[in-house]
Amino acid sequence: MNLTSLQLPLSELPEEPVEALTGTLPAEAAGGYFPYMWLLVALPAFGALVLLVGGKRTNAWGHLLACLLPIGSFVLACLLLAQMMGAPVEDRLVTLEMWDWTFAGMFDVPFALRLDQLSMVFVMLISGVGSLIHIYSIGYMAEDPDRRKFFAYLNLFVAAMLLLVLANNYLLLYVGWEGVGLASYLLIGFWQYKSSAAVAAKKAFVMNRVGDVGLSVAVMLMFVTFGTVTFEQVFAAAPEAGDTALNLIGLALLLAAVGKSAQFPLQAWLLDAMEGPTPVSALIHAATMVTAGVYLIVRSNAIFDLASIAVTAVLAVGIITMVAGAVIACAKDEIKKSLAGSTMSQIGYMFVAAGLGPAGYVFAIFHLLMHGMFKADLFLSAGSVMHGMKDEKNMRFYGALRKVMLVTTIAFICGFLGISGLPPFDSFFSKDDIIKAALGTNWFAGVAAIAAAGLTAFYMTRMLSMTFFGDKRWKEEADPHESPSVMTVPMLLLSVGALFGGLFFVYVGDIVGWLDPITGYQPFVLPINDTVLEIVTLVVVLTGITLAWRQYASRPVPQQPPQQVSVFTTAARNSLYDDAFNEAVFMRPGQYLTRWLVWFDNQVVDGAVRGIASKVSGAGEQVKRLQTGFARSYALLMVGGAVLIGVVFVVARWL
Amino acid sequence: MIILPLVEPPPIELPELDWLLLGPMALVLGAAVVGVMVEAFAPRSSRRTIQLVLTFGSLIGAFVLVVLAAGSGGPVMASAAVIDGPALFLQGGILLVALLAALTMAERHVDPSGDAFAARASAMPGSEDERQFTARGYLQTEVWPLFLFAVGGMMLFPASNDLLTMFVALEIMSLPLYLLAGMARRRRLLSQESALKYFLLGAFSSAFFLYGAALVYGFAGTVNLGGIADAVTAQPQMSGLLLGGIAMIAVGMLFKVAAVPFHSWAPDVYQGAPTPVTGFMAAGVKVAAFGALLRLMYVAFAGSEWDWRPAFWVIAALTFFVGSIVALVQSDIKRMLAYSSIAHAGFLLLGVIAVTPEGLAATMFYLVTYGLATVGAFGVVMLVRDDTGENTAMENWRGLGRTHPWLAGAFALFLLSFAGIPLTAGFIGKFSVFAAAAAAGEGWLVLLAVLASAIAAFFYIRVVVVMFFSDPVGDGPAVAVPSWFTRTAIAFGAAATLVLGIFPQPVLEWAAQADIFIR
Amino acid sequence: MDPGNYIILSSILFCIGALGVLLRRNAIVVFMSVELMLNAANLAFVTFARMHGNLEGQAIAFFVMIVAAAEVVVGLAIIMTIFRTRRSVSIDEPHLLRN
């Protein structure tokens, strides 16, 4: 691999960047609301600025302003969507040029926003779910002394995330990418007085940093290869670039996506990130930011279509994470960690879909959209439970909550229906599409996707029954109560999405036709009959539900006083031994795999992180020792350096 | 008695002086000379006022002249110097940095007993003399002419058109700095030690530079940079004189920019020198020395780039890795900033290695953004104090974000800019240098640099975390309330860092228009 | 006489100076060693001027002497203040500044 050979001679770089980008419509020409699309980003950014600069003066009304601004973005997004739907297909890609960054008189990077069908979907999801979660947070954070700061960070996040999906080039995307990383970091560590939160924030930072290096390397490689980083120009130039260059760029982009989306092998930070407040988990670590990796890959489809190695790597990463995440979700007792495992697994589905190439891109986005709704719903419901249970996270201390939290139960059940793949709810459409596309393209991926669907049903049923059904296993001080309506209304709205989103996008809004001009869609041939496949999948899902229900809900769990946790655990384990099938199929491998994953996480991933850190600081200590404080030893070092330069001069002459 | 025959001597031809182009330098150096006179003749009570007027007047005037001269250019002083686009751009940058540094030097509300400088540099620390001077509230005013001389040297350094002028400029810049480094009011022993080390090692390195210049003169028969370039292209075969000369000149220059392994002085001197001087030195010397290094490598030695490039690869990689890695284990803010400046020298070397107009423009932009943020950062360091002076131990900065959000916010902004986080000037600077180097075919080196800057981000963010995410220590340091001098410096630095991160275009364009050295 | 010999002499002087900086402990002697290095460079300049037949190198030597004199002033001032404080001119003694 010789990077220098990838480089275009300077003379061949385009003298003037192509002014009228092919296929894009300037926002001024598009008219209507398009020239105002910068407001999408500017409104929440303004909120963050006001709250951070205004300080304590804004305590009284800051959170209301912070809610209104994303809602404003959402309203504008709706208007834009309506206008875009009214426009003919060729006029749906609109670019708003704002100003230019010209680097060293050579690289022209427009600071421009690009709204097309793909970014429109994301803008709707981010501003819509984001607004609901802002409203929910008013209730959830009501008693937090730093509520204003929380809302400032949340606004900052929404602005950065919108910038990420609206950027028309990779450099601006990188700006948003770093911005969401920063906001996520600030919010994970928001309760910094908990040392676990500080550690989690640090871990998230380290692992995201690894991914960010991938993105900056990718941007640099694009500059070297194409001389530009604008989406249109890169995609137009991609077919002429060499195989090696494209695969390198693809792998670098994948590294970035893996870090941000918590995919194998950089998945470990997401479980720890659950230390953040629950609205953050719902918005950032479920619905939006963690899906940025999927966005990046789908957006770069022109590159991945030509990079066979990179696209295979995407598929492999997706399969591993899809299964491993589901297994983790089966074995975690903390409700949020179980949901985090589920998030990894569902994003694994999206990676699988994206790894299938043109057959799957659309479904990756479809599932992403569905996931944004049902997972946000599930997280908010879980947050509502924790809110009522004095921040108890362990499901072993829940049980029978349906009797006291009816609305939350309903919302959670809606989320459950949305994720588990039962007809006619969200995942029944989106997940089945992925399974079909996978079977039609790569049978191994298809079988893995079906198996993961069974696991999904299992862990979701487990969560549902341990939390809302069975017997009370509450701690004494727990005083479960329903949450205020400022929290339940957003939950119910998301529930509607979780129930009917799939129906809507299949029968009313044609998602495939909508995204086709951007991602391309290539129909595939299924090896088996459509209906048979659907029935098989449904049977697997129902099996998962039944097994989990038998395990966690229909057995009488003795009412245990909270201090005797170990007795309850032992009892649970004994009952596990009764059911040999359960144990053989789910529990034991699950526990082993979880244990192994935990080991892997602790020893290998953490070990690597720690190892690299200690190696690096060890090297630092070594070099530090050279800094003796004696001027003469510094002079000696300088003479050594002079000799070094001389030697390299001579060697370079010889070679 | 010998009577000389009365012969009409041939008329001495005076070189043409273009006063518009020479004006900025002449103004600053002239003000420095007047400043020396003021020290000798003006009454003590009025000296500070006169010196401040002289300093700020000449710096602002020189900056205005630089702006007026923008676009014009040519050789001056019989080709001893050349004022061209890059020279004017860098002189403008140096003057801005110097203005901010002068503001922090003029601060006297922070230290209860005066400003940052010893009342009398020659008095023994802790002696009866010193106590008396301090008790009478004497302020050191000799620092101002010294400062102006250093600024004048810095301005001449990147404009020098021959090796001799470059050597003289280097010394005009360095000699006052050696003295300024030893004048701290607090912790005199450390300050004096840093001055001694800086002086001896600096003199050592300039001897290398001079001997290298002699060897190059032996090769080319001239010290004029254009003449050297002609000789290099005329004689493509190996020449020990030329290679030895380039190597030794490089040693001298790399010492000034604090590249590894010529960096050891930097942490010690940065820590020991009075903080306003450290900021000035860290920013100004870096801008000036890189300007001169660029001119040398782009004009004189461009013809033999394949001889010196490999050595510069090694030095650059060593510099950014050692700088980033050693910074990780520092517990003192000033030392951490010193290693950070070493790492930045490594990144900047990428622009030198590129040898393209884009590389030149990118490096100049980077230099200016780095300089402004550096002066601001050291301005903040000045304010965090306890009874014995500045408190630079990192653990004492805990919780600063809670107690002093504005100050900590500004410092965080500077650190984020150093780390190259988007929407700060540092990001644009780093990105343009990396892109220029990548376009010049230095792909591998850029990859290494990206890796090093990922490591570097950790220690910057670590300080941000310490400031914002830790609880304040009980009897932690107090933050002094500065006068408008320091406030202006920090605020201007922060504003520039932010504005150049979002709307860099005008400055980038100016740099891009000034991307050719006149020979 | 071959002017090359002068170049050899000057490089020997330069090396002696550099070794002096590395080996001697007395700040004044170290400083004198640096001056020796500067003078080595001067000798080289003058010799090369002779070899090239132009006067540039000779003129440079004068400039270098002036600069060296300025350096002496600054250097002695620094060394003197340190001597007053510590009663010693050893350059190894002050090493408070280190990691």
Image: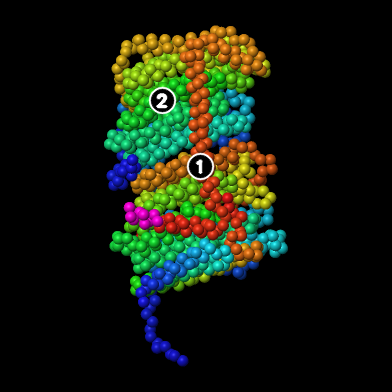
- Is A648 part of what is drawn in magenta? yes
Res. C77 in view: yes
Q: For the residue labelled by badge 1, is the local secondary structure a helix, a strand or a loop?
A: helix
* Above/below status of A519 relative to B386: above
Image disc number at residue A616: 1
* Above/below status of B51 relative to B488: below
Residue B218, by quadrant, is bottom left
Image disc number at residue A318: 2
The disc labelled 2 sits on which kind of residue?
Gly
Q: Percent from the top left, x then y, of residue A123?
A: 43, 27
Residue in the picture at 37% in, 14% down: A507
The disc labelled 1 sits on which kind of residue?
Val
Residue A238, by quadrant, is top left
Tell me if mark 2 has few (under 14), some (14-19) or many (20+) residues whose alpha carbon lies within 10 angstroms of its own: many
Using the image, name the chain to which the residue with label 2 belongs: A
Using the image, name the chain to which the residue with label 1 belongs: A
**Which residues are the magenta region?**
A647-655
Q: For the residue labelled by badge 2, is the local secondary structure a helix, a strand or a loop?
A: helix
Residue in the picture at 60% in, 32% down: A195
Relative depth, front residue between A97 and A513: A513
